[in-house]
Amino acid sequence: MNKHNIVREDILKLPKSDLHCHLDGSLRLATLVELAREYKVELPTFDEERLRHTLLCGRRVDSLESYLKAFAITLMVLQDKDALARVAFELAEDAAKENVWYLEVRFSPLLHTNRGLRYAEIVDAVLDGLQRAQKQYKILTGLIICGMRDRPPAESKYLAEVCVAYKNKGVVGFDLAGAEMDNPAKDHQEAFTLVLTNNINCTIHAGEAYGPASIAQAIHYCGTHRIGHGTRLIEDGDLLNYVNDHRIPLEICLTSNLQTNSVRSLDEHPFRFYFDYKLRVTLNTDNRLMSATTSTDELWLAAQHYDLSMNEVKDIIIHGFKSAFLSYRVRKNLLEEALKIMDRPIYPE
């Protein structure tokens, strides 16, 4: 219970960002069913409530690997340009309707080639959906291309080349996603070297299902600018101080971390320690469908469970805007506009 009397509606009204959101984990359930019928995809069930259970939708599992199995279902309907554009538009639309001003959507084009689409067609379709939403709603979006840890590093290198080709065309960064166990980030170092030498931002899933060594690899081998999750950073105090000293943002996803068993309970999640220790923590959805969450819900959950004041909620929102993969001037203008609404002074670096 929050003793500061924060209600969910207060958070809903605030400008927000979502920096860690997967396209293939953030479909509307009804859209998934419609697309399956349209493209004659056989789902485990067409009953939405049963499908909700199959897709986890907030249900806890034993591991990240078990959580990732649900994506095989959503990916079946995301093999067509129109489907990709529709899902991207709807995701940005849903975010905009809860006052998300800036949304970064991430996905791996290599997972959308089952029906013969080429990478350029796939990226163009997603960008089309996002850009249509930008014209219709008050939202800025950026697309992050993901390499996959469990795929050959040569594929990550090729995806990095795609990322470079789409620089300044809607793609704002490069990521490495997928199961951490036995799939070290350093194997994909060549892809990140290509991205970094082309002055493109990068983020890496690390420290979610594997220890702080995964985070160290992401930083020191791959040069990441942000850490996706970072739940286990707390296990290495020296590395934690390095992350803090260099203001490397953490993309925290509370509901997802609990759901994948990355933490046994919210009480054991290091979020409150990170925040109190002044790390740059951001709160994000990860997968709106699988985790049955929104940006508002993640901030609301943190406010309730960790007894945050409204000023602390606003500080976390500020961290998000400061950590966005936007140019300095755009980021500064967006933050200043948000600060006026939040009635907060300029927040120090």
Image: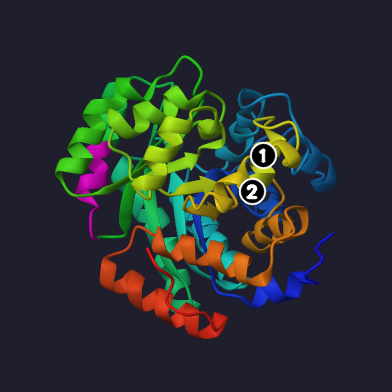
**Cβ atoms at labels 1 and 2 below 8 Å apart:** yes
Point out the stretch of residues depicted in magenta: 160-168
* Residue occupying the far left of the picture: 197
Q: Residue at x 69, y 67 (%)?
A: 309
Q: Residue at x 35, y 26 (%)?
A: 217
Distance from Cα at disc 1 to Cα at disc 2? 8 Å
Q: Is residue 346 left or right of residue 153?
A: right
- Residue carrying label 1: 269
Residue 134 quadrant: bottom left
* Residue occupying the far top of the picture: 182
Q: Secondary structure at mark 1?
A: loop
Q: Residue at x 61, y 24 (%)?
A: 65
Q: Residue at x 26, y 45 (%)?
A: 163
Q: Is residue 197 left or right of residue 341?
A: left
Packing grade of label 1 (10 A; few <14, some 14-19, many >=20) is some
Res. 80 mark = none
Looking at numbered disc 2 in the image, what kind of residue is underneath it?
A: Arg
Residue 25 quadrant: top right
Q: Secondary structure at mark 2?
A: helix
Residue 124 quadrant: bottom left
Looking at numbered disc 1 in the image, what kind of residue is underneath it?
A: His
Q: Is residue 6 above or below residue 179?
A: below
Q: Is residue 88 above or below residue 113?
A: below
x and y percent of residue 346 in the render? Answer: 42, 76
x and y percent of residue 179 in the render? Answer: 51, 25
- Residue carrying label 2: 272
Q: Is residue 177 visible?
A: no
